[in-house]
Amino acid sequence: MHSSRRRLLGCWPIAFAGGGLFAGCAQVSENRQRDTGPLLFPRPPDTPRFVFERSIYSSADIADEDRESRLRRMLTGESRQGSSLAKPYAVAVHRGRIFLSDSVERFVRVFDVPSGRTFTVGEDEPGRLSKPLGIDVDRAGRLYVADITAKSIQVYDRDGRHLRRIGGETMFDRLTSVTVDPAGERLYVVDIGGVNSDKHRVRVLDAGSGAHLFDIGRRGSGPGEFNLPRDVALGRQGQVYVVDGGNFRVQVFERDGRYLQSFGAVGRQLGNFARPKEIATDGEGNLYVVDAAFGNFQIFTPEGDLLLFVGDRSERDGPARYMLPSGIYVDEDGRVYMVDQWFRKVDIFRPVALRADQGFLGTRGLALKGGN
């Protein structure tokens, strides 16, 4: 390893898409305790790109609270009560409605921030879930859930009504993730295989009929091959980005499955991976990759150039602190949602160009934060 390269928690110069060159020093989480004001990324004096907005742990974090209840809590010191997350895994968001898969509770918990309502999906037949992991939503708000135990994809409408089931014992071996294109026409399902399996692949299906269209990849370490693939994200031009966990890289394919390129390698340097998990894209085509070992997400250009990383690994909970991060999503407004299984929460980051009172979370989200 070349001695001049800097570690992941050191100072680094890097170009941000749409911005100029900035030289940032990431602060370890213990130092953040002494900071005042909003938590910005990157840290001042560099030009900030994201601000930490809030965390959600339970239904109490989005529910309305009247003035009398708030006053009573202030006098007694009691905390707000609500239905908490048990072991959240993945997150998807549609117009301010936050969907979180919970592998222990065996359902998808829904936080509808604009209405202050919470409900669950997949507790009853039809469409009862056994062990939901990866989830996604299409442009219409339809919810797609990868059930690793049932070896199927369950599809629901935006309000949780079951629509159909895709797959089964003969379709998947060990599915962990599902990604749908915005139009709701095509599914990309990660079949992670296993130690003794060569079926490490992405299965591409028709989202309506469930018909199998083709597969991407097989087990290996060469171009277009996978070792324990984890998740898929789709680019603005239809590119298919696959987190190849065991090979510590992201591979890029055309919509038809033709291999294009890859980026990333194992290591502790900027742009390296140690335990990559889920991936998301934003409106500009940038990529957000969760790394469970680093306790952060790294942001890359569509070509794989590192822009920024957000978060620290920590044994103590707090804003942008993670022990076991897993899921990530970028909503229509550019807000980033990051799930941590250990601290049982989802953190929300807002682009600094977006005011707190804008977007689908908007003033209600800000008011609820202030009211807690």
Image (tube, rainbow, N blue to C red):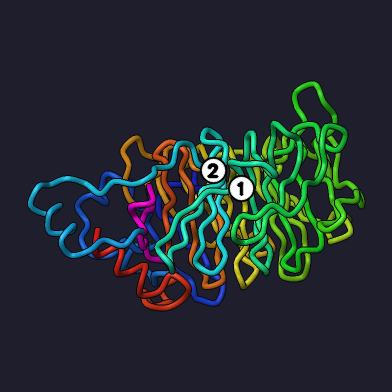
Residue ranking furthest to the front: 125
Residue visible at 67% across and 64% down in the picture: 302
Instruction: Please identify the quadrant where the C terminus is shown.
Output: bottom left
Three-letter code for the amino acid on which mark 1 is drawn: Glu
Could you say which is closer to the camera, residue 152 or residue 182?
152
Q: Identify the secondary structure beneath mark 1.
A: strand
Q: Is residue 230 left or right of residue 36?
A: right
Q: Quadrant of residue 226?
A: top right
**Residue identifier under label 1:** 278
Q: Position of residue 110 (x, y in %)?
A: 51, 53
Q: Which residues are drawn in magenta?
A: 50-62
Three-letter code for the amino acid on which mark 2 is drawn: Ser
Residue visible at 53% across and 48% down in the picture: 120
Local crowd size for mark 1, using a 10 Å CA cut-off: few (<14), some (14–19), many (≥20): many
**Residue identifier under label 2:** 326
Q: Position of residue 100 (x, y in %)?
A: 53, 49
- Contact flag, marks 2 and 1 (Cβ < 8 Å): yes
Q: Position of residue 184 (x, y in %)?
A: 76, 64
Residue visible at 77% across and 55% down in the picture: 252
Instruction: Please identify the quadrant where the N terminus is shown.
Output: top right
Could you say which is closer to the camera, residue 264 or residue 216?
216
Whole-number angstrom distance, CA of label 2 to CA of label 1? 6 Å
